[in-house]
């Protein structure tokens, strides 16, 4: 247990580094306008190239994790991220180069996340996995209060060159942490020195089947945050009222209540967080003031603060070690894929029902689906485990 306590700060920093590497480029449109790249379609392709490259190959990235030692995979991904971000910084106003280097950065991001999450599921014991993942996920939320405000300040202060070089520095941070991680117990020259399971082995697992369905429903609520800004604009509210309260609540619940995921059965909690997220999103559609908007942001932050590390921890609960690289890649594929699907769904619903109506229909359906998810999918697994579920 002492070894895990020493490992947690490194994993927190690694999660901060890779998430900050991705999220700092949320501000990229401001930089692109400065270098002379304009037009929503062009900027959209440059931004979207990263997420397409990080999401689509996810299931195949498991092969790298299984074949090579995880620390080397992490270091290679960090190096690739550094190359991509340096290339981006040197591309100027060349749209083809900007898209190319965003693709390289996206591949690096996807590979690093799959390898890092697999490493966590392998080295952290079952009995403390929930709490440990909650603490580690603090690093994933920290960019909202550290690197993003810093990047925003650089841009608004006219330090555009400083901003664009933040990416390479964060990639280097990821590489340093990768070299600081110890090999997992039992690791050999090729990753964990064991025979890895097949995709068919993974899909035959009933708990994995349930996790995939549950992850999809959770991912739809998680990705709905991308549509909060259009809703705020429709209601004349400040988007940051929701975003800031969401970020603070998610951080606090992970720091103060990190033991929740070990004290309460994770199988049952998986459905509860979907209901919490859906209720919060539903409530935002009725917000008339920024204070009300912030209130629903807090509730949403509690749901995401618990839900995100919970679903990563469930990978280790439902899949044996021989299948965890593939399970990790698949769960990340679904979570990130929802960030493509949800905005499209919400966009079509908004065109028909308006922004408030869209936030009432989709979250409302998800809210009422969660009980069925628990009773017909998660509850039979709990019964099969003699009335209990992983903690």
Image (cartoon, grey):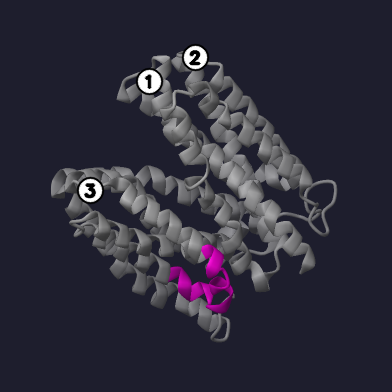
Q: Is residue 56 visible?
A: no
- Residue at 44% x, 27% y is 157
Q: Do callouts 3 and 1 mark residues in contact (Cβ within 8 Å)?
A: no
Residue position marked by numbered label 1 in the rendering: 33
Depth check: 336 or 196 in front?
Answer: 336
Assign the N terminus to one quadrant of the image: bottom right
What SS does tag 2 mark?
loop
- Residue at 56% x, 83% y is 388
- Image coords of residue 275 (percent x, y): 35, 68
Q: CA distance from mark 3 to mark 1?
A: 26 Å
What SS does tag 1 mark?
helix
Most common secondary structure along the magenta stretch: helix
- Image coords of residue 141 (percent x, y): 51, 52
Assign the C terminus to one quadrant of the image: bottom right
Q: Is residue 159 magenta?
A: no
Most extreme residue toward the front is 157
Q: Is residue 296 visible?
A: yes
* Side (left or right) of 245 relative to 123: left
- Image coords of residue 173 (percent x, y): 67, 39
Say the numbered circle drawn on residue 92: 2
Q: Do callouts 2 and 1 mark residues in contact (Cβ within 8 Å)?
A: no
Q: Nearer the viewer, mark 3 or mark 2?
A: 3
Residue position marked by numbered label 3 in the rendering: 237
Looking at the rendering, the stretch of residues picked out in magenta corresponds to 254-271
């Amino acid at each position: 247990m002492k070894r895990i306590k020493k490992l947690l700060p490194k994993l927190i920093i690694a999660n901060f580094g890779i998430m900050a590497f991705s999220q700092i480029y949320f501000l990229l449109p401001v930089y692109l306008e400065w270098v002379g790249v304009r037009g929503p379609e062009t900027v959209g392709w440059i931004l979207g190239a990263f997420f397409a490259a990080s999401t689509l190959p996810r299931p195949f990235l498991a092969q790298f994790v299984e074949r090579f030692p995880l620390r080397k995979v992490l270091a290679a991904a960090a190096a690739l991220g550094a190359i991509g971000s340096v290339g981006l910084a040197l591309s100027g106003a060349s749209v083809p180069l900007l898209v190319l280097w965003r693709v390289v950065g996206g591949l690096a991001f996807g590979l690093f996340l799959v390898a890092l999450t697999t490493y966590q599921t392998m080295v952290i014991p079952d009995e403390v996995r929930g709490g440990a993942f909650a603490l580690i996920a603090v690093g994933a939320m920290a960019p909202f209060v550290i690197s993003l405000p810093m990047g925003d300040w650089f841009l608004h202060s006219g330090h555009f060159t400083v901003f664009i070089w933040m990416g390479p520095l964060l990639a280097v941070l990821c590489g340093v942490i990768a070299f600081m991680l110890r090999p997992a117990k039992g690791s050999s020259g090729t990753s964990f020195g064991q025979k890895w399971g097949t995709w068919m082995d993974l899909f035959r697992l009933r708990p994995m089947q349930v996790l995939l369905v549950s992850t999809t429903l959770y991912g739809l609520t998680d990705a709905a945050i991308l549509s909060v800004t259009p809703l705020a604009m429709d209601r004349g509210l400040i988007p940051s009222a929701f975003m800031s309260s969401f970020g603070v609540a998610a951080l606090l619940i992970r720091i103060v209540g990190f033991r929740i995921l070990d004290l309460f059965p994770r199988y049952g909690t998986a459905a509860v967080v979907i209901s919490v997220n859906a209720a919060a999103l539903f409530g935002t559609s009725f917000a008339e003031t920024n204070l009300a908007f912030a209130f629903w942001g807090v509730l949403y932050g509690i749901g995401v603060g618990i839900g995100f590390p919970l679903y990563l921890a469930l990978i280790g609960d439902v899949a044996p070690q021989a299948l965890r690289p593939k399970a990790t890649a698949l769960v990340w594929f679904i979570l990130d894929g929802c960030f493509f699907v949800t905005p499209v769904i919400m966009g079509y619903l908004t065109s028909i029902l308006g922004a408030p109506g869209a936030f009432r229909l989709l979250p409302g359906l998800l809210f009422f689906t969660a009980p069925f998810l628990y009773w017909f999918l998660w509850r039979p697994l709990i019964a099969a485990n003699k009335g209990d579920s992983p903690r």
